[in-house]
Amino acid sequence: MTGKVRILLIAVATLVISGVAITKWLDFRQARDIGVINDMLAAADVKKGREIAHECEVCHGLEAGAVNRIGPNLFGIVGAKIARDPAFEYSYALRQKQGTWTIDHLDEWLKNPASFVPENKMIFSGLLDPQDRMDLIAYLMTLK
Ligand code: HEC
């Protein structure tokens, strides 16, 4: 084996090993984040979530069959497809967003809508307190 080939092999091996390590670390971080969210959700206060939801009712109906207001109806939103209602005129940005309203996605959206979906049209600055978001999401989960 020439010196050059050996150096190349070592470089490739180093890259592969660090790639695996980074992936493992990211998996671990994600698992840890989801664990934290689950713990917070378990400790959430649905009653407090109901109170926080009054802020949303300025724009959103929360009961089954409520008409869309400035924002779409949120009954049954947890686990639903993002931009699910063909009768509501969503922003282009939200319509392009793939996936469902998982607890994670709702948490990010409610923390900062503009960062989760840039150029969306929900004018809401966000709930900064993570426990407030969990209380609210726990309440939204009861709307089904
Ligand atoms: C000032 C009005 C306003 C307020 C207040 C508001 N929203 Fe919205 N919301 C909207 C609008 C408008 C949209 C549609 C956004 C788009 O199409 O980009 C929306 C979209 C959403 C969606 C996506 C629904 C879907 O069908 O995919 C969720 C979830 C949501 N809002 C949750 C909330 C919650 C929870 C609160 C309270 C903390 C809240 N919003 C407060 C106006 C508002």
Image: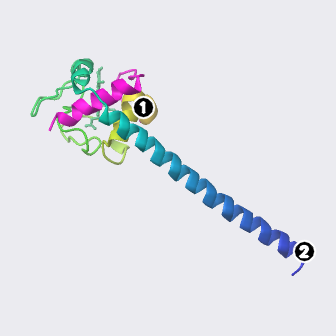
Q: Amino acid at mark 2?
A: Gly
Residue at image point 67% right, 63% down: 17
Is 107 drawn above or below residue 32 in the view shown?
above
Secondary structure, mark 2, is helix
Residue at image point 21% right, 25% down: 60
Q: Position of residue 97 (x, y in %)?
A: 37, 44
Q: Which mark is residue 119?
A: 1
Q: Which mark is residue 35?
A: none
Q: Quadrant of the N terminus?
A: bottom right
Image region (quadrant) for ligand 1: top left
Q: Is mark 2 within 8 Å of ligand 1?
A: no
Give the labeled residue for mark 2.
Answer: 3
Front residue (pair 46, 83)? 46
Q: Is mark 1 within 8 Å of ligand 1?
A: yes
What's the magenta region? Answer: 117-144
Q: Position of residue 22 (x, y in %)?
A: 61, 54
Using a 10 Å C-alpha cutoff, classify the residue at mark 1 as few (fewer than 14 neighbours), some (14 to 19) or many (20 or more): few
Asked if one can make out residue 39 in the rendered structure from this viewpoint, the answer is: yes
